Amino acid sequence: MSFQIKKQPTKYDVCIVGSGAGGGMAAKLLADAGFKIALLEAGPDFDPANEEQRTQLRWPWESPRRGAGSTRPFGDFDMAYGGWELDGEPYTQNSNTEFSWFRSRMLGGRTNHWGRISLRFGPLDFKRKDFDGKGDNWPIGYEDVKPYYDKVDKLIGVFGTKENLPNEPDGFFLPPPKPRLHELYIKKGATKAGVPMIPSRLSILTKPINKERGACFFCKQCSRSCMAYADFSSSSVLVKPAVETGNVDLYVNAMVREVLTNGEGEATGVSYIDKEDLKDYEIKAKVVILAASACSSARILLNSRSAHHPNGLANSSEVVGKYLHDSTGSSRGGFIPELLDRERYNEDGVGGMHLYTPWWLNDSKHLGFTRGYHIEYWGGMSMPAYGFGFNTQALKEAIGDTSRNAYGTGLKKDVKKFYGATFGMAGRGESIPRKDNYCEIDVNTVDKFGIPVLKFNYNWSDEEVKQAAHMQDTFEEVMHNMGAIPLGDKPGKESNYGLEKPGKIIHEVGTTRMGTDPGSSVVNQYNQAHDVPNLFVMDGGPFVSQADKNPTWTILALAWRATDYLIEELKKGNV
Amino acid sequence: MDRRESLRTLVMGGMASSFFLSSCVTDKESPIEEGDIIEEKQGYGRTPAEIERDEDLMSETFFTEEEMAIITSLADIIIPEDEESVSATEAGVPEFIEFIVKDIPEHQLPMRGGLMWLNRESSKQFNMPFVETSKENQLKIIDQIAYPQDFEKTSPGPTFFRRIKNLVVTGYFTSEPGIEYLDYRGNTPNVWDGVPEQVLKKHGLKYEEDFLKVAMDPANRGEVMNWDDYEI
Ligand SMILES: Cc1cc2nc3c(=O)[nH]c(=O)nc-3n(C[C@H](O)[C@H](O)[C@H](O)COP(=O)(O)OP(=O)(O)OC[C@H]3O[C@@H](n4cnc5c(N)ncnc54)[C@H](O)[C@@H]3O)c2cc1C
Ligand code: SF4
C-alpha cells in the first residue's frame, strides 16, 4: 500500500459529500444551474432498474432465507446496503446509554428503502418553544420553507388530500389511492375514539409527473426501490438526472475522511479513501456541502481538526454532535375477527399505508407530556416472508379457539383462515432535543479506514416515556372501538410503554443545528456554517427540532432553500 | 432496445402495458420477450458480498442424513398433502430448514438437541428411533408435544415442537405451492382501485363520497399531472 495522497486534477465549484436526500437535491439543482460538481458517495452505484440489483417483484422463494433479515436487517429484498452494523465500521456508546445507528451505503443512501412518508412541518413545528417553553425555536418559520415544500412536491411528487388542518399544511398532492379493508375498519374505530384518520402523504406517483418516471403499478414494495422510478429515491430521481447534465462527476465507494482547510480556515475540498484501492485522494472545490446524514456529517466535521479549528471544523460553538434527537416510537398489533377467512383479491396497493393519523391534540395542555405524535398503520393480505405463520397459535388463543390443529391439514387451513386478519399501529412522536444527547469522536477507536468513529450518548426523558404511554392508551381505545383484539400484553411501565430505544426510528437529526447565534448553533438559516462561509450542511443535521413528522421532506425543502442561496452567493462571488 | 430498456418502457408505459407485463409474469406457457426478463433467474439482486455469503452457506452441510430423515417425516406430519395442496417435503421445506439453520445459527442447537430428544423419547417409549417406529407411534409422541398437558408445557418436547412447526409453516407458505394454496394474489403489476365492491358490501363499509372525488382515478392515471388549476 502506498501512502502518497493523490490529488484529483479538476477543481470543482462544489464538492458534495453523500448522495441521499440532501446531497441528491443539492447535486440536481447545482448541476442544472451549470456548476461543476464532484459528488462523493461512500457506497456503490445503484439503480433500481438495474436487473442485477433488482429485488422488486421477486418471490420469497427466490431468496434461500425466504426474505429473512439475516443478511439485510429489514429483510433480504429490502433496498438498503447496510444496516445497524457495518463490517469494519463500528460505533461505540457511553456507558449506560444505547443508541442504534442505521446506515445505508449506496447511491441514494437511505432514500432507496425509506417509507416515503412525506410530511411538511407545520407553522407550530418551527416555533414550539413559543407554545410550551421547551427546547428552541427554529430561526425560520413555515412561511420561509413553504415555497420550497411546494417546489419539492412538484419536482418529486407526493400523493395526499387537502385537509385544511392548521398544523398539517396541504401541498401539491397527486390523487391518493383508496384505503384497504383493514384501514377502513381502523378508521371506524378511530373515528369513534375521536382520533382522525386521513389519506397518507407518500412520495409515490399515482400519476406520472414527467416523462422520465413511470406511474405506480401497486406492488407495495417501495422498500425495494421502484424500477419504474415511481417512488422517490434520490438515486433515480435526483442523482441520475443530475449526472445526465454532464456537470457531475460521481465518485462512488469514496469514503470521506475530513474537510480540508487553508491557512485562513476556509474549506478547500475534502480528503477521501477510495474503497477499491484503499488509497487517499483529495478533491479541491470552492464550496463543500456535507450531506452524509446527520451523524456522519458531524463525524466528518469533528474529525476535520486544524490549528484554526482545534475542536473540529465549524465547531467554535462546541455544539457539533450535540442535540442529537430521534423520533419516539411505540407500537401494538391486533386482530380483526371480521377478517377471518376473508375473500381474496390483490390488496397490495402502494408501498405503505393508505391512511394515517396526524397529531390531533395540539390544543390540549394537560396531557402530562409536551409534544405530539402521529400514527402509522400496517396490515392486509401481504406477500408472506420468513416469519409468516409463527403467530398462528397465539392468534387462536387470542380468539379463544381451542380446536386442536397444532399440526396436519387443520393447521394448514388455520394459517389460511387467519391470513390478512392482523394489523398494527405505531406512534411516531416528537422528542425534545437536549444538549446532553450527543455523538462525539471516540478517540480510542478507528474504523477499518483509520478514521476515528462516533461514540453516542443518548437517554430519553420522562416526556418521551409519558408520550409512549399515551400512544398505548390510544391504540387500545381505537382497537376497542373497532372491535379488534389487541395482541400480546399491553406494554407497561417496566418497558417504558414500548418506547423504542433511541435511534430505532431512524429519524436522527439535530447534530449541526441551525440558529442565528454562532455561539449556540453550527449553521445559519441557509445551512451555511457560521465559522466557515464556504461550508454547508444539507442533511438532517441542521434541524432545531424534528416535529412528529418524518424528516425527509423537510431535509429536501431546506436543501433546496440552501442551494438557492448558495447559487446566489456563488454568482455574487461571495463564496 | 436492450431487454432492460424494453422492460422499463413497458412498466413506464402506463396501465395497458402494465397489464401486459402482469400477464407475462404469470403466464409461463407462452414466453414472450418481456416475460422472459422477469422470469429470468439471475440471482435475486445480490451484492458481491452477499453472493459470497450465500455460497458459503450453501457449501456447508449442517444436518446429518439421519437428522434430515426426522426433519422430513416431521415436516410432512406438520403439513401433509391433502386434496388442496402438496406436502411440506414436496414444497421443499426440509431443504429450506437445512439452509435457515446455517443462516440463523440460533436455530442450530435447539434443533439438533430437539431432534436428539425426540429420538430418545421414541426409543424410551417404543424401543426404536423416531423414523423407524410406526406412523401411529410417531403420532403418539407428536400428540404429547403438540398438545402437552399443563405440567409438560415447559418441557423440551413442546418447545422443540413449536420451533420446528414455525419453520415448517414459514417454509411452506413462502414456497411457490404454499403461496398458491394461501391464494395470495399480489406481487404483480396492477391498478389498485380499492376494495372490490362485493367485499365492501359484505363488511358493511363504503368509501366516502368526498374522498372518491379526489381519489386516484384509473381512467386518467396514465396522464401526466397538470397543476394549472390546482390551488392550496
Ligand atoms: C426503514 C426506514 C424507513 C424510513 N422511512 C421514512 C419515511 O417514511 N419518511 C421520512 O421522512 N424518512 C424516513 N426515513 C428516514 C430517511 O431515510 C432519512 O431521513 C433520509 O434518508 C436522510 O437523508 P440524508 O441525505 O440525510 O442521509 P442518507 O439518506 O442516509 O444518505 C447519506 C449518504 O451519505 C453517504 N455517506 C455517509 N458517510 C459518508 C462519508 N464519510 N463519505 C461519503 N459518503 C458518505 C452514505 O453512504 C449515504 O448514501 C426512513 C429510514 C429508514 C431506515
Ligand atoms: S408500490 Fe408503486 S411506487 Fe412503490 S415500488 Fe411498487 S410500483 Fe413502485
Image: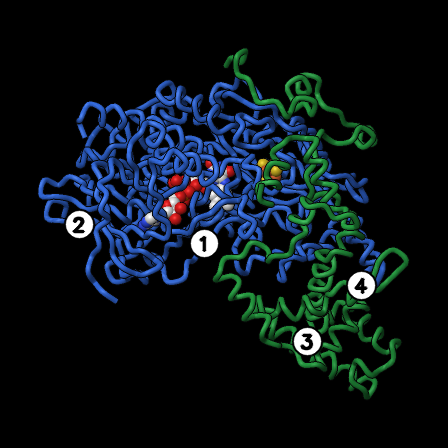
Do the residues at discs 4 and 3 belong to one chain?
yes
Subunit of label 1: A
- Note whether A374 is above or below A268 in the view shown: above
Subunit of label 4: B
Q: Which of marks 4 and 3 is in front?
A: 4
How far is mark 4 from mark 1, CA to CA? 36 Å
| Percent coordinates x, y for residue B8 in the rendering | 59, 39
Q: Which of marks 1 and 3 is in front?
A: 1
Q: Does the residue labelled 1 lie within 8 Å of ligand 1?
A: yes
How far is mark 1 from mark 3, CA to CA? 34 Å
State which quadrant residue A182 falls in.
top right
To which residue does mark 4 refer?
Answer: B79
* Left-right relation of B43 to A156: right
| Percent coordinates x, y for residue B127 in the rendering | 81, 88
* Front one among A452 and A14: A14
Q: Which disc, if any, is residue A305?
A: 2
Colour green, chain? B
Nearer the N terminus, badge 1 or badge 2? 1
Q: Can residue A288 be seen in this view?
A: yes
Do the residues at discs 1 and 3 belong to one chain?
no
To which residue does mark 1 refer?
Answer: A82
How far is mark 1 from mark 2, CA to CA? 28 Å
* Crowd around label 4: few <14 · some 14–19 · many ≥20 (10 Å): many
Three-letter residue code for mark 1 = Gly
